[in-house]
Image: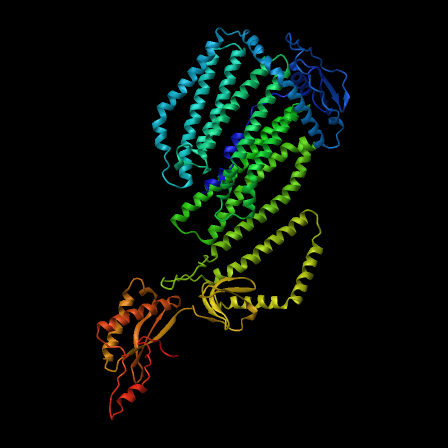
Amino acid sequence: MAAARWLLLATMALAFAGPAAAQTNAAPGEPLLLTLRGDETPETVRKLVDALSAGGRRVEVRIGGVPADSPAPAAAPASPAGKAATVPKPPPAPSAVETADTQAEALVDYFVSGLDYGRAAIPSVRFLPDDWLRSWSLNQNASPTTRLFASLALALGIALLFRFATVRWFAARMRPRAEYFTARLIASGFGLLQDLLTIALGLVVARLAGSYWLPSDDLAAHALHGITNGTAVGATYVATGRFLLAPGQPGRRLMPLPRAERHFRLLCTYAVLVPVFIVAALLAHRVSGGPEPVAGLVTLSGFVLAAYKIWWFVDARYDLTALVLSGSAEPGPGRRFLAQAMPWIYVAIAVVLWMVGRAAAMMPNGGRWSEAAELTQIIVVLAPILSVGVNSLLTCRQARRAAIARPTPLAQALGHAVRAAAGGVMWAGGFYLVARIWAGLLFGMSSGQFGQISRQIASIAVLAFAGWVVMVFLRGFFDAYAPRPRSTGPVDEDVMPEDNIPSRLATVMPVLRGVVLTAVIGLTILVLLSRLGVDIGPLLAGFGILGLAISFGSQALVRDIVSGFFFMLEDAFRVGEYVDTGRLKGTVEKISLRSMQLRHQSGQIHTVPFGQVQSLTNASRDWATVKFNVRLDHSADIEKARKTIKKVGLALLEDPEFGPHFIAQLKMQGVADITDAAIVIRLKFTSKPTQASMLQREALKRVYRGLIEAEVPFASTAVTVREGGGKGAAGAAAITAVAPPSPLAPAAE
C-alpha cells in the first residue's frame, strides 16, 4: 500500500520522545562557570546569573576566559540532616574539557563525567520520599490530597462522559467509505479528532478545577499541573497509535506494520512510562534540597527509557524491514539496504541522544544541548513522516484520476516528478533544521556564518536536487512508453496470442532511456563539480580522447551501434514481432544499443548483434495470407465442396472469438492438382499476422467437419488389386502398400 511508505517512522516518533531531564551543570559545592563573549547586554547577563544561581549555587562569570570583577555569589542552602554524609560527591568536570583538541574529545569527556556523576547520584534518590513528605506538609491549600484527587476525578469523568455522548456520531464517520488511502485517512482522522477533543476537554477541566480548589501556588497545585500534563502526553501517544495502527480495525489502518497489535501494546506501555518519569523528574526538582537526587532520578529514568527503546527497535527489526520493502513492488539494492539498516539506525540514534543527554548534564551550556537533542528527535521523525505522507496523498490522488481516465505518459511522468519533489523538499527542510541546530554547538558558527555557508551549500544542493527530479521525470516518461514485459515461459499454441505489438516509439524508448539518463547523470555531475570549484575542462578533453580511442579500437562495437541505429530508424522490427535474420529467427524480446534478443519457439534466447544482420525478414507486419490443400476423392462434387467451404468461412467471420482476426475470409481458390489418387483443392484466407497459425488450425478443423456432414468424400486410402491372366497371386505379391498422404496435407510450395 502507499500508506506503508508514509508511516514507516510514525511509531518511532513516539518512541523518541522522552522526559524533560533536569540538568545539573556542575558538581555540588563547585561554582558554576559562565563564560561570556563580552558583547552581551547587562539585562542578558543579569537573567543568566539569576537563572544559574536559582539553585543556591555560586556563579563565576568570565569574559573571554578572564574572571570578571563582580561574580554573583549566592548562599548555598543547608542540606537536610543526615544527607551530607551519605550523598556521594561527583568528580569534578575533567580538565580535558578546556584543553581538548577537538569538540568530539570534549563531548566524550563530558559524557564520561556526566555518566559518573549520575551513577554516583543514584543512591541519593532514596531521600526523595522524605523530601516529598516534608514539602507536602507545607501546602497552603486546605485538604490538598482530597482536592487533588477530586480535580483529577472530575476531569476524567467529564472526558469519559463526552466520549460516551459522541461515540455514535464519530463511529459513523470512522468507517472508511472506500479502500483507497484518502478514505482511510479521513476515517482515522475522525478517530484522532475524538481522542484529541477528549484529551483537551479533560485537561481544561483539570486546570479549571485546580484554579478553583487549589488556588495557592504550592506543591499540590504543581502536582496537579504535572499529573494532568503528563497524562495528556501519554494519552496523545495512545491517540497517535490508534490513528496510525487502528488496533482492532485493520480496515482503516494507515500503517500496515506487521504485528501492529503488538506494537500498539508496546506503545501504550511507553505512553505510561513517559508521563511517570516526566512528573517524577519535575516534582523531584521542586521538592529536593539539592541536585543529587534529581540527577540520580533522571539518570535512572533516562537509562530505562533508552533501554526500552533499543529493545523495541531490535524486536521490530523484521517488521521495519518488511515495511520498507513494501513501499516498492520491485525494491532495488538501495531500498533493500535501507530496509536492513533502518532498525539499527534507530538504535544508533537512541544511543547517541542518550549520550548527549548525559554529557549535557556536565556542560556549562547543557540546556542548549538538551534542547538540540529534543529538537533533533522531533525533526528526525517528522521529516520522513511528512515526506512519505505527502507522497502517499499525491499517489492516492493520481490513482483515483487514473481510475477515471487513463493518464498520458507525460501526466504519469509529471506525477512521479511532483511526488519526488514534494518528498525531497521535506527531507531538505529536515536536514537544514538539523544542520542549523548543531552548527552553532559543534562548530561555534554564528547565524551570519551559517547563513553564508548554507547559501553556498544550497546552490549545490539545488542543482543536485533539480538533476534528481529530472531523472525521476525521465524515468517515469520512458517507463510509461516502454512495452509491457512478455511472458518468458513456454508458449501454448492452443491459446490465442495477444495482438499487442508496441508502437515504433515504444520499441525505441528502452534504447533512448539508457542514453538520455546516462547523459543527464553525466551533465549533473559535471555541473556539480564546476560549482565545487573543480576545473572540468581537462575532464571533458579526457572524455573526448577516450571516446575517440574506443571508436578506433572497437570497430565492431561501432558497427553494431550504427547498424542498429539505422535498423530502428527504418522501423525494420519492433519488440514482440517475429523476425528471421537468415541464420536465426524468433520473437524479438529485447532491444539494446548494440544487439537484440530473439526468443525461438523452442524457448532458446538468441542474442544477435546488429552488425551481423545482413538481411531481416519480418513476419509480423500488417497481414499474412495462409494457403493450404485438401485432397478429395475423384467422385467428390467440387461445387458442393466450394459451397461448404464458403459456409465455413462465413461462420468463422461471425464467430466473436475468431472473426475479428480475419482480414479476408476463408474460401476455396479452386482445383490445384489432379493425381491418380485424389483431386487436390487449394484454400486460403488473410488474417492478422500474429493469429495466422491459430486460425489455420481452426479452419482445418471446421472444413473437415463440414465436408463430412456434406458427404463430400476425401481421397481414399484403399488400394484396389485386380486378378487376371493367372497372374493374380504374383501381381498381388508385387504390390507395395504405401500409405497415401493425408487429405488435409498442406500444399507443396
In the rendered image, residue 707, in percent from the top left (x then y), is placed at: 25, 73
Horizontal arrangement in the rendering, residue 700 relative to residue 136 (left or right): left
In the rendered image, residue 639, in percent from the top left (x then y), is placed at: 23, 79
Q: Is residue 689 above or below residue 61?
A: below
- Which of the image's four quarters has the C terminus? bottom left
Q: Is residue 222 above or below residue 603?
A: above
The answer to whether residue 16 is visible is no
Write the residue at 69% across / 22% down. Answer: 41
Residue 219: image quadrant is top right
Horizontal arrangement in the rendering, residue 642 relative to residue 316 (left or right): left
Write the residue at 34% across / 70% down. Answer: 696
The answer to whether residue 396 is visible is yes
In the rendered image, residue 520, in percent from the top left (x then y), is placed at: 59, 53
Q: Is residue 600 above or below residue 335?
A: below
Q: Closest to the observer: 677 or 166?
A: 677
Q: Is residue 422 above or below residue 247?
A: below
Horizontal arrangement in the rendering, residue 503 relative to residue 547 (left or right): left
- What is the basis of the colouring in this image? rainbow
What is the count of numbered marks? Answer: 0
- Which of the image's four quarters has the N terminus? top left
User: Residue at the bottom extreme?
Assistant: 725
Write the residue at 46% across / 51% down. Answer: 411
Write the residue at 60% across / 68% down. Answer: 559
Q: Closest to the observer: 674 or 110?
A: 674
Q: Closest to the observer: 413 or 712?
A: 712
In the rendered image, residue 349, in percent from the top left (x then y), is placed at: 59, 33
